[in-house]
Image (cartoon, rainbow, N blue to C red):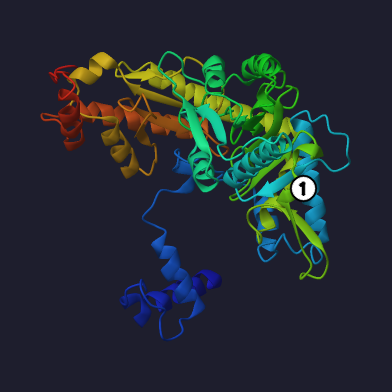
Amino acid sequence: MNQQKQHDDALTDIFGSEQMLDPAPAQFIPKGKTRPEIAYQLVKDETYPQTQPRLNLATFVTTYMDEYATRLMNEAIDVNYIDETEYPRVAVMCGRCINIIANMWNTPEQNEWKAGALGIGSSEACMLGGVAAWLRWRKRRQAEGKPFDKPNLVMSTTFQVVWEKFCQLWQIEMRTVPVTLEHTTLDPEEALAACDENTICIVPIAGVTWTGLNDDIEALDKALDAYNQKTGYEIPIHVDAASGGFILPFLNPDEKWDFRLKWVLSISTSGHKYGLVYPGLGWVVWKDKKYLPDEMAFSVNYLGANITQVGLNFSRPAAQILGQYYNFIRLGYEGYREVQQNSMDVATYCHDEIGKMNCFRNYADKLVNPLFIWYMDEEYDKQSKWTLYDLQATLQQSGWMVPAYTLPKNLEDVIVMRIVVRQGMSRDMADMLLGDIRNAVAEFEKLEYPTPSRLKYEKSERQKGRVYTHTHQC
């Protein structure tokens, strides 16, 4: 009771301070100092008017770790991974994580330390995989005395923005294969039709950000093998497994998508997604050390010893490495399988319940990852007074972040919503979300006039000859 009184007195002191009457600094550093408890409260208060992380069903990023993992990471918050001479055990744990992930993906490499690298998120990991493919291609072209100024990369239009960044920054032509409502993933034959002698790699995706689906990597590998034999090319596959890399090994271990396939030479994933670690953490692994160009390793000697590193970033936090290694020890294979299966079961439940609503249609019949998208039923949509953007805004009032967006090229007219289920999302929370969706729809159907987003949508659609009557009920 005495401690509570002291705490209350301290808060009274904070909210009775002059600093609480001043606006938070936005342009210039304050001239004077602020007591730490007041500075803490000012910053903390800035975070209140936003979605709570576990209610953010838009993000793929981990929003829950247990108290021991959080403690370990907090205790390493001041450790810079790159200082391997000062923190050699962190480097060892990083190498062990790469070994574990490589073996999880069925690496054939026999070396004690597998060929891989740490990234700050899967974006850096993708970049490293892409750069390695580009450098290998360039080296072959140089050895053959052929021009190497027009490299290209092939993937579907459901690419994550990092690949657009990669192609722009390294001046590589991005050749995209459109997806359709009938053909929802990368078509192997169309992908090969886009290839030529300048293709550095094809990038299928395990866990598409836009849709939650997986490209058929085994079918692509088979078709690519025949193509490479016919043409004499050596076009490899880099698998962007940002989400699927930590789902497939546990929920579909027999599915061949990884290093069991001939032309899969590198794979990237996100440790801070279904690797269950707080951001930012990514991993990239190569099938063998020979596929990791020597030019990608940089050495420095000004940290007390000669340190060689593969990565776009230099300084980086060590805490996430500890978090990943802790998860591997704490959860083991069975623990990961249970967590991922629970996420899949909750996602399947939400998918099925939303599919029962007459106003919605699910994009895919079956889930392959713990996330899915849906869109408005076509007949209902023709007579509706609202859009999925209105549903997003209404759910956000209850704290949920469920994004509405348009699909990529060739499907720009299709507005969808997406739910990403991660560790920390329970069946009870799913019921609360579904209840809020049903209540929102019921209120929308009482509307007398179309919403502003609906009017904007209809204005665009009328230009395409579509007509709306606003009489249908869900």
Q: Quadrant of residue 70?
A: bottom right
Q: Position of residue 101 (x, y in %)?
A: 74, 37
Point 81% across, 45% down: residue: 96
The residue wearing badge 1 is 294
Q: Residue at point 55% right, 39% down?
A: 424
Seen in the picture, residue 395 relative to 297 is either above or below; the reply is above
- How packed mark 1 is, by other alpha carbons closer than 10 Å (few <14, some 14-19, many 20 or more), is few
In percent of the image, x 79 and y 31: which residue is there? Answer: 107
Q: Nearer the viewer, residue 190 or 215?
A: 190
Q: How many marks?
A: 1
Q: In this view of the protein, can residue 159 be seen by the observer?
A: no
Q: Relative to residue 311, is residue 465 depicted above or below?
A: above
Q: Is residue 355 left or right of residue 322?
A: left
Seen from this angle, which residue lies furthest bottom?
32
Q: Please, what secondary structure does the residue beneath circle 1 have?
A: helix
Going 45% across and 38% down the picture, which residue do you hit?
A: 57
Indicate the quadrant containing the C terminus: top left, top right, bottom left or bottom right.
top left
Where is residue 13? Give x, y as percent.
Answer: 42, 79
Callout 1, which amino acid?
Asp
- Residue 35 visible (yes or no): yes
